[in-house]
Image (spheres, grey):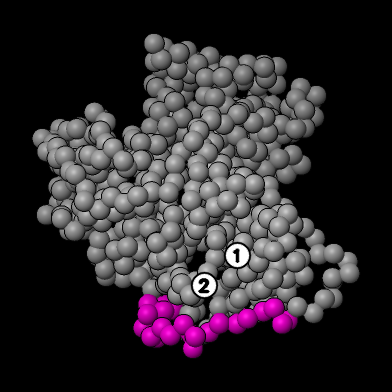
Amino acid sequence: MKKSLIYLDAENIRNSIDLLEVAELVHGKGEVETYALCIHQCPKEAYGKFDVIINVQDDSIQTYDVLNITNCLEEMHRNYTFDSILIPATHIGRMLAPRLSMRLHVGLVADVTAIDHIDGILEMVRPAYSGKIMAGIVNRGRVPIMMSVRQNIFAYTSDQVKKTLSINVYPTSVQASNISLLEVKVKEKTKDIRESTVLISGGGGVMDQFHRLDELAVELNAQVSASRRIVDSGIATRKIQVGQSGNTVSPKLYIALGIYGSLQHIEGLKNVENIISVNIDKDAPICSLSDIVVEGDAVEFIEKLVEKIRREKV
Amino acid sequence: MNLICLVKFVPDVEDFKYDVTRNVLIRENVKMILNPDDACALAFCLKVKEKDPDTFVEIVSMAPTSVVGHLEDLLRRNFDQATLISDRMFVGSDTYVTSRILARYLEGKTFDCILTGTHSLDGDTSHVPSQVGEALHLHQMSNIVKIEETQFKTGWPVVDVDSERFISSYRVGLPAILSVSKESKYKLPFVKFKNLELDVSAKIKIITNRELGFRADEVGLEGSLTQVAHTFTKNLQKEDRIFVKTDEEGIDTVYDFLEAKGFI
């Protein structure tokens, strides 16, 4: 049985747990014993999913103190000898993973988005050159296998409920830290569509009801953008136009409502992670780029999805 | 103050062209540029030097000797020294090996702070700043958008860090490695007209493996712990597309997708 350790980062607990999927893809389902490490108290959701949860009990360790978290992880690795260590590619995780790999003298692959096995050899796939190419990376023999995993790519869906063993550990390797958190501010919402994480975009198919896009934008904490047709008709300003003659955007989610997807529009979409398109013509060019194609009326889609989101919130 | 700034020259990814028939990305003959995040780190160093002319700023880069022209161009903007770490043996080094090479050079230096960029346009692993930090036993912080200059001199600067949803302020004790993001908007000034032809060649120092003393099997491709097995371009067309309608089932599918991806 292989042993895999997953670091649970408070910044994105749910997706840290989703790394269980990666552990199974690396070692094989049912062939891996999963360990979670969390600083202070482990969130309830993790119980029943991991075989072992290691709670680090030391109030002097802060969740941003990468040096001391590295010390803890190293100490645990010396105790358990893990076959793999998986770290979510959060802000902290992306500093933690390289430090730990250096400490353990093992290779590290960053921002993994897929796991392959080619001729029996594990390949960790990651984007490079701003996502223009993908690279399959192999680890040259040393264990543990280490990677940081791009957030919100993998999902762990197993219903299996495990009997989780919960252990409190009192690390012996804590050192004085010269870093302290003074203040945390929630970032102000920007008005620039190029900086938006989620864009609700409208085209010719929503010409008369373009203002309705706001309803969905509010629910998804998104901004509204438009295709050239909308801008040329004077319904929206060029500031929010997506495409070659407008803005190039790279949101994580692009919802294209009634947009045909001409080449000049698609030119404006760069490294967009997820696209949902709603169109009465499911063969419109934008649909071939989409993760989900919804065939139908875009305004009806807005109404129903907004209703669903509000209902689930209650 | 003694500041060291680690920089990297990267291919201009916007310059890449697709060979549509072979479905490959053409990476040859692409011009090299200073990595944008690193340019911000350099710009911050110049700001410090402007207020405190006694500040000594050394630029350190590991690259082929073909980047000398780029380094000269930087030196003409008032940096004090540029060190180019360059050796045929180092070609093909992964981030682990690169960090060890940089750390071995830096071990022998005295400095108050090391500045770097956070992301690079090419590999974008962000490994090197953290790994150098580990090798030198220093704290390291990524995604810095602001460094408070007045406290910087006291050795306990406050830095603002952008972690997507939040801006967090930390107090960091120096020496440390501070990795700046291009969101910081620190801007490298142009070379002054009178300095355009300035001879700065005496300010460039080249360090090879003769000074650093690695064994051949510790560096380059051979010493690397990871290796690129193959590269491929992403197929633009999504393979596993889901087709639904605007009925209840369709809306539920979209909702579940949004929830799974963390948008709700």
Q: Circle 2: is it few (<14), some (14-19), or many (20+) Cα within 10 Å?
A: few
Name the chain under label 1: B
Q: Position of residue B100 (x, y in %)?
A: 42, 72
Decide if residue A265 is on the left or right side of residue A131: right
Q: Which mark is residue B109?
A: 2
Q: Position of residue B165 (x, y in %)?
A: 51, 34
Closer to the camera in the image, A16 or B152: B152
Decide if residue A258 is on the left or right side of residue B53: left
The residue sitting at 50% across, 42% down in the picture is B170
Q: Which mark is residue A197?
A: none
Q: Which mark is residue B2?
A: 1
Q: Is residue A130 above or below residue A57?
A: below
Give the image quarter of residue B14.
Answer: bottom right
Q: Magenta residues, as a range?
A: B201-223
Is residue B22 magenta-colored? no
The amino acid at mark 1 is Asn
Closer to the camera in the image, A215 or B179: B179
The residue sitting at 54% across, 52% down in the picture is B155
Give the image quarter of residue A196.
Answer: top right
Distance between mark 2 and mark 1 Cα atoms = 10 Å
Q: Residue furthest bottom?
A: B210
Closer to the camera in the image, B76 or B237: B76
The amino acid at mark 2 is Lys
Mark 2–mark 1 CB contact (< 8 Å): yes
SS at badge 2: loop
The residue sitting at 50% across, 33% down in the picture is A183
The residue sitting at 69% across, 26% down in the picture is A204
Determine if residue B149 is in view: yes
